[in-house]
Structure formats: C-alpha cells, structure tokens
Image (spheres, rainbow, N blue to C red):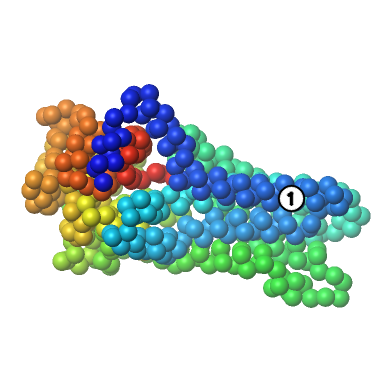
Amino acid sequence: MAAAGQKSLQQGPGGLSLTRLLRFLSSEYRIIFTLVFLLNLIGAIIFLWLWFLRGHPNHSTCGLALALNLAVSIVIREEHIVNGLYYAFTAFPRTSPLWLRRRMGKIYHLGGLHSGCGVAATFWLIMLSIEKTDSFSSTERRDGARWAHIIVIYMLDCLLISMLVMAYPGVRARIHNAFEVVHRLAGWSSLALWWCLTGLDAKINTPAGHSTAVTVFTSANVWLVFISTCCVISTWLNCRKVAVESERLSSHALRMYFDYANPQPGTTIRLSSRPLLEWHAFATVNNPKENGFSVVISNAGDWTKSVVNNPPRQVWVRRTPTCGVLRIAPMFNSIVLVATGSGIAPCLPVILAQQTRITLFWSTRDPLETYGPNIASIILGMGENAHIHNTSTMGRPNTLPTVLDLYKKTESEAVVVISNPKLTIDLVLDLEALGVPAFGPIWDS
C-alpha cells in the first residue's frame, strides 16, 4: 500500500531517474512484444539452420508461421476476445495479494501481442518471399498458378511493410489520419490476398491426381485465415447507424446520448461518420440506475471539432462496448483517480458504480461552465473525496506531489490516470518509479 510508495520516496533524483528509465524499458507492453519477437526469432534461426544443413527449406514452415502470427494479431483485436480477457484478468478477488492484482491490472497492455505478432508476420513473409523466389527461379514449371503465387507474395510484402512503417510510433503520431486509412485498407487487402495465397499454395502443392480441395481443408493455414476473417466480419456485422441525442455542454464539449445498451463501467465504444475510413473511441458514461449511456466529446481534433460544432442526429457505432483501463478499478479496495479535462468522462461511471472507494483529482478549465451542471453534480456529490483544480483561476497544478499526497493520505492501493498521452505516460512512470501501483492508457497500436 502507501508504505511501499513512502519507502520508495527516499530515493535520490539519480536513483529515481534510473528506476523510471528501467520501468519504461520493461513495461508489460514491451515485455510481451519482446517475448513474441524472441520466440519468432528462435523459430527463424532454426528454420534457416535446417535450410543450411539440408540444402533446401521446409516448404510449410514460413507459411504456417506467417499464418499463426497474422491470426493472433487479428484475433487479439476482436471486441469479444478483448472483453473475455479483461473479465478473466480482473476476476481476481480483492483479497488476492496486491502484487498479483497489480500485475493482472496491466491487461490493457495486450496490444503488445498485436504489434509483436504483426512485426513477426512481416519478417516471416519476407523469408517466405526469399524462399519462394528461390524456388520459382529454379523451376522450369512456371505456370499461371506459380506466377500468381509469387505476385501475391510480393503484393503482401508491400502491404505489410507499409502497415509496419505507418504504425511506427513517430510516424503514426505525426500523420495519424493517414495511418488509420493505410492500416484499414491495407489490412483488408492483405486478408483477401492471404486467402488467395492459401488457395494458390494448395494448388501448387497438390500432387497430380489428387483433390486440391482436400489439400486446402487439411491445411492449418486455411483454418487460421478463416478464424481471422470471422473476427473481422463479426466487427462489421456489429456496426449500425443509430439515432443519437446531443447536449451542447459548452463551445468545447458535447454530450451524446444512446439508448441501445447499458455498458459496464470502464468500457468504450467507437463512433464514426465515415465507417470505412476512421473510428474514434470514447468512454461510455452510464448511471447504474438509468437505461442507456452517453459519451462526452471535447474539441480535441478535426473530427471532434466538427461534431461539437455540428451535433449529428445519427452516427455510426460499433455496438459492443469494449473494456478499457478503468475496467480494472473494482480489483482494488481504494484508488486515486487522476483526470484532466474531458478525461473525467470515463471516470464518471466508475464513480457512480461505487464498487470501490475513490479519491478524485480533476484538473480542468472552468469545470461547471465547460461540462455543465449534471457532470458537476456527480463530482460535487463525492464531497471531500473530490479535489477539483480549476486551471483558469489556479494555474497549472503540480500534479505528481499532489497525487502522491492523496495516495498516502487515503492509503489507496493504486492510482489510475486518465489524461492526454504525455501527462498520462509521464505520471504513470513517475509513480511506478516511486513504487506506487499506477495505471493509464498507453495508446498502443
């Protein structure tokens, strides 16, 4: 509890900086990514070594490794799979040791599996390209199927490499809209080409006089691509254009009301005006005593600005609420919630659910004028457990010392930060370097 954090506070600045760096390098996301990459690297080394010893490669290894990595990368993003993993990891009772709940609470780092398998799949595809190019150049039977096979592989190379480049954090942050379009369109195209590759591979490897269909359906690859396709289709079958009521909170914020579901606290939904090109995630806000839910949208980008200025009557939604970082709140007996600006929105259902003792620190500009009396009444209803820092009259807060003080005074078990990317990452790293269990969105791939 707070004792661990208090003991760690005795570190000097140099020790804190080193601990912070080590924590940054050893985040759960990076651990998962590294483990996935190392396992694939070991497999690649064994594959190349056997190729060297035998003088020819195992013709199924690269294709199977590619299919496995692509399948995991796709499946781990399906909403129901994500929710199932969250339910499993957050099922540990509060009587469990804090170190275990602290580790299980990092379930939101599962994006490391998506990106790790995506990178590994790209490298396996490059090796498959080398293998098949060598095989193609050495054979005299260059029929239409073999030409199509090698062309499909090269097209997949271009698509996966382009997705990899656009997903690099620096590139993604700089041209995020382009990343979204490339990732989506290249992803669909890759899935279609993957089907073509699986069929062509079966046709080429089917002995004369045997059925190609038998080869296809006895191949593990076809079932992996089938499962992946089902996950993609299920997401799109879940999309609907629904009616929405909008409440203009201020010139900077809008609240949109939906009536088709009663999501649990700590979940998000995705909204869009152009479902084929872009989706935007927002935390669900629901009162356990009322039907339906709402989302709070603040003026923070091109799409949100247009929505705030011109509230829609209908909007596209992915109807299944997906668990987010605040889904872990009930795992702890008491937490400090840190929010800035519209980051208060995902905190509201957690506060209303009253599943754990919460101390809130909310830093924002003119909270009543910006977010309206309804949201303000929820916060004020927390009494002494709510600490509001109005940046218009009080300036920028010294967040780290304030949060540490609240953490120690309330003897909380954890801190959850909902803010902009920079503050969230910095504050979580600083707190964890001081021994405080801290959580916050990581804006992964």
Q: Residue at 14% of width from left, 35% of height from top?
A: 390
Q: Residue at 26% of width from left, 46% of height from top?
A: 1
| 341 in relation to 196, above or below | above
| 174 in relation to 78, above or below | above
Q: Nearer the viewer, residue 218 or 107?
A: 107
Q: Nearer the viewer, residue 6 or 53?
A: 6
Determine whether, in the image, residue 204 is placed left or right of residue 400.
right
Mark 1, Cα crowd under 10 Å, few <14 / some 14-19 / many 20+, is few
Residue 156 x %, y %:
66, 50
Inspect the image, locate mark 1, and give the three-letter code of the amino acid beneath it.
Ile
Residue 212 x %, y %:
77, 72
Residue 242 appears in the picture as rendered: yes
| 3 in relation to 230, above or below | above
Residue 57 x %, y %:
81, 53
Residue 370 appears in the picture as rendered: no
Residue pointed to by mark 1: 46
Q: Residue at 71% of width from left, 72% of height from top?
A: 218
Residue 196 x %, y %:
68, 61
Determine whether, in the image, residue 168 is placed left or right of residue 269.
right
